[in-house]
Image: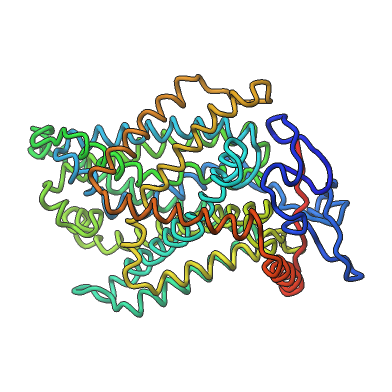
Amino acid sequence: MVTLGKRTKSNYGTMAKVGDVDNRPVQQGFRRESDEGTVVAAGEGKTDATGKGSDGGIEMKKELGLMDGVAIIVGVIVGAGIFVSPKGVLRYSGSIGQAIIVWVLSGALSMVGALCYAELGTMIPKSGGDYAYIGEAFGPLPAFLYLWVALLILVPAGNAITAITFAQYLLQPLWPTCEPPYESVRLLAAVITCLLTAINCRNVKWVARVTETFTGMKVLALMVITGAGAWYLIQGNTELLEDPFANSKVQPGFIAVAFYNGLFSYSGWNYLNFVTEELKDPYRNLPRAICISMPMVTIIYVITNIAYFAVLPPDEMLSSQAVAVTFAEKMLSFMAWTMPLFVACSTFGSLNGAIFASSRLFFVGARNGHLPAALSLININCLTPVPSLLFLCALTLLLLFIRDVFAIINYVSYVEILFIFISVAGLLRLRQKAPDAHRPIKVSLVVPIVFLLTAGFLVIFSVFESPMEVGIGTLIILLGIPVYYVTIGKPWRWLTHKSQAFNRFCSKLFLCMPNSEKLD
């Protein structure tokens, strides 16, 4: 990372200065207003126990331990997907056996990717995840394009869909024979988004406690499903599993999309990398949290799907809007009403973790001068990035009231895999660029190569299977290039002045100060 007005070591040992890395004007992102009203640079300084730096800047405290990290990864990954739409993998696999293989290999591929991110996260111990790694490896423009897509669609739309799913399942018992009213669903989704944003603004420990509590509840729900499925099989009901590979689809396009659906259900395994700066002892706890959580999620997912397949015929699964609810109606009798509640709790915890982690992405982007500097401010009392959290909340609320928000995410969903591909390619780039950099964890070269070959296969063949979605997603990425040069490369003077004024306004309104970033 870079500091203002002097050369400094980056995390991989090379020398950089302001202007070399992202060509941003020095007044953006790293300046604060003193008590006398003059603008001074925020330099490097040590922080005390309260998070206040000796230079007048402040830092977010390291409050997340190992189990908090595990809870964040499991909590974000296990959202509504495993309860609602395992049918996507089945539809493109064609058979139960091939679907199970896809679930297993999707978990294995996610684990491989997570190990690559463990090396990146301990080598570059900054919040921001993919954004930070792509910036270090390939420069500011590719990093900005990731931030652009995440800002415009991926993060707020993903959060909006999770909030809508929560509201639908919490309200479902009140309208047992029909869909809950559109207005009621959107209003409840907006309320829960604002509530979780308020919790995230107030205290990081509260966020961790909420995440741990609801992660436990969703794991309990999956244990209920697997227990019921095991009991059903023990009674000798194995007919649905007798010919598991019948009707398998072996065309590359179908296999790619089946894996794509499986990987989508595992998405979120890289979210802990977004909050590395708030993780205690990240060099140990980041890889340990990954190695604990990813096998756990894979085992849970595979066993849960076997339970589904043992009870529900493929046709019934493919016609179901919520596989877990259909399963509960068939197996839990009078207790079936609990499953919508479990799904709501699952999405509540997932949304909480997603808000916490993704807000740090915009915080780091602003700190690097790629977003208005106000989004890099930290509240002096709570030591949380309040402006970034409120900005993300506003974007999510905006998308909540677009009736076809699910269609929007479909057009750009492949972009996430594309940028993960670029991040892992960045690992190889950094090994060439900085071979002597400190790497607390260094995975075998085979690991990123296997991931890149597999991810490349998925991206290439998804073009043939879903050309319109891929085309629109690519167009959105390319639109970020002129935005970058207008706002970052050679910013208009009036835009710089407006950004400074907005920064001062937010500092006073939210009682915030600039981040004092430490360099290792």
Q: Residue furthest right?
A: 36
- Colouring scheme, one of rainbow, by chain, secondary structure, one colour: rainbow
Quadrant location of the N terminus in the rendered image: top right
Position above or below: 255 against 27: above
Horizontal and vertical percent for residue 492?
Answer: 67, 64
Residue at image location 52% in from the left, 55% down from the top:
148
Residue 173 appears in which quarter of the rendering? bottom left
Q: In front here: 145 or 297?
A: 145
Position above or below: 493 against 207: below
Position above or below: 397 against 230: below
Residue 505 appears in which quarter of the rendering? bottom right
Residue 496 in view: yes
Q: Answer with left or right where residue 149 lies relative to residue 5.
A: left
Quadrant location of the C terminus in the rendered image: top right
Residue 205 in view: no
Residue at image location 24% in from the left, 73% down from the top:
179
Q: Answer with left or right where residue 502 lies relative to residue 188.
A: right
Q: Answer with left or right where residue 419 lies relative to residue 21.
A: left
Q: Answer with left or right where residue 502 lies relative to residue 155.
A: right
Horizontal and vertical percent for residue 293?
Answer: 47, 38
Residue at image location 61% in from the left, 58% down from the top:
206
Q: In front here: 45 or 185?
A: 45
Horizontal and vertical percent for residue 512?
Answer: 75, 65
Horizontal and vertical percent for residue 395?
Answer: 50, 68
Residue at image location 28% in from the left, 75% down from the top:
180
Q: In front here: 60 or 478?
A: 478
Position above or below: 139 against 81: above
Mark count: 0
